[in-house]
Image (cartoon, rainbow, N blue to C red):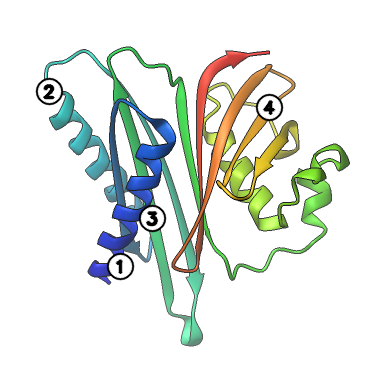
Amino acid sequence: MKNIDQQLTRIIGDKWKEFVAGGLTAVSVRAITNNVEARACREEVTLQLRRSVKNEPAEIFLSLSHTIRRLTGGVRDGLAVAIGYAASSAAVKAIGVDMEYQSRNVHPSILNRIAGAHERHAGLKVLEYWVAKEACFKATPMNHGLLLSDYSVLGFDADKGVGQMSVEKNHAQLEFMLIYVSGLIVGLAINNGIQR
């Protein structure tokens, strides 16, 4: 499993660097069976960034996601991903990550609870809306009282896997990226503090 962890870390890390463009980045993916192991993934990214910035004044942003599935015989199998970003003059105000197995069964009625009719033009599947909105939720520092339905997809470029999202209640604008790799869908989000 270590090889798949390293492969996913590299792939997601390359996409994350492309998405954020600038600053220091760190990504870690590891196999897990419980939440304690997921937190270790976040600690690894924190240490990587702290070593990189050393004595430079930099703001560090972190986000963590994990997904666990039950296999035959009650065996639990999962992955955690942690991403980090640091820059001395951060244009980014917050970051978010969410990850789910593409095989996760999500009832179609969930779409009515998380996405309004006005945003369905984006053409995303239910799980894609879920992952994109979860990542954006995590990239919204003042998200207390917000629901996934408060986040609206403004547009999505399927060829590039990138889109824009807004939050009407706090006038935030976010960018997100969806990555499909090794049976997973990973959502990355950045909040650069732009207000409408």
| Mark found first going from the N terminus, 2 or 1 | 1
Q: In this rendered view, identify the residue nearer to me: 21 or 195.
A: 21
| Mark found first going from the N terminus, 4 or 2 | 2
Label 1: which secondary element: helix
Image location (x, y in percent) of residue 61: 36, 28
Mark 4 lies on residue:
166
Marks 1 and 3 sit apart, C-alpha to C-alpha, by 12 Å
Label 3: which secondary element: strand
- Which quadrant holds the N terminus? bottom left
Image-quadrant location for residue 120: top right
Judge left or right: residue 134 versus residue 168: left
Mark 2 lies on residue:
54
Judge left or right: residue 146 versus residue 67: right
Q: In this rendered view, identify the residue nearer to me: 27 or 123.
A: 123
- The residue under label 1 is which amino acid type? Ile
Judge left or right: residue 65 versus residue 157: left
- The residue under label 4 is which amino acid type? Ser
Mark 3 lies on residue:
80
Instruction: Please tell me which residue is depicted at 71% across the width and 57% down the height of the picture.
Output: 125
Image location (x, y in percent) of residue 97: 47, 43
Residue 37, can we see it? no
Image location (x, y in percent) of residue 140: 55, 26
Q: Categorize mark 4 by other alpha carbons within 10 Å: few (<14), some (14-19), many (20+).
A: some
Marks 4 and 1 sit apart, C-alpha to C-alpha, by 34 Å
Q: Categorize mark 2 by other alpha carbons within 10 Å: few (<14), some (14-19), many (20+).
A: few
Mark 1 lies on residue:
4
Label 2: which secondary element: loop
Instruction: Please tell me which residue is depicted at 63% across the width and 41% down the height of the picture.
Output: 133
Marks 2 and 1 sit apart, C-alpha to C-alpha, by 30 Å
